[in-house]
Image: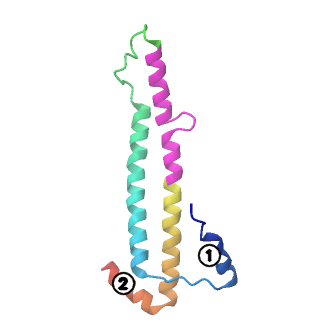
Amino acid sequence: MADSPFPGYIEAAKTGALRVRMDPQGFVEIDRACQELIDQLTGARADARELGEQTQWGLGEDNPRLSSAAELVRLFREKGFGGPNNAYDTLNEYLAVAEEIRAMFKAISDAYQRTDSEFAAKMRELRV
């Protein structure tokens, strides 16, 4: 496995030697990718909640002789929504991170647009 370049980048950033090219198209693409991820996570979160609220699974859970079927359904429901370490809550955490990343890049883009007229003009052009 190759060595990570990040320690060198971090040190260069600390000393002011790191150069980053700010590409308006990159900001547009990051925003779009974040929104797509947010949409997908929102859909998956809704699916997880639906699974947690589903009453009939067709596994024989209503048959008193199949107690393991009822237990399995309970476990599935708890994993979907409401139980410990469930999918709904985990997806909520991922969604919060995706929204924070999107907000961070928007703040960076907004700051560049306020201070760099060429960058701002290119952003306006890309958003049309």
Q: Amino acid at mark 1?
A: Tyr
Q: Amino acid at mark 2?
A: Arg
| 1 or 2: tag closer to the N-terminus | 1
What label does residue 9 carry, if any? 1
Magenta region, main secondary structure: helix
Task: Read off the residue under disc 2.
Answer: 124
Residue at 57% x, 35% y: name it: 84
Q: Which residues are magenta?
A: 68-94
* 84, above or below 30, in the image: above
Considering the numbered disc 1 on the image, is that residue within a helix, a strand or a loop?
helix
Q: Position of residue 61 (x, y in %)?
A: 40, 17
In the picture, the quarter occupied by the N terminus is: bottom right
The reply to whether the magenta stretch includes residue 77 is yes
Residue farthest front in this picture: 1
Q: Position of residue 23 (x, y in %)?
A: 44, 82
Residue farthest top in this picture: 65
In the picture, the quarter occupied by the C terminus is: bottom left
Image quarter of residue 123: bottom left
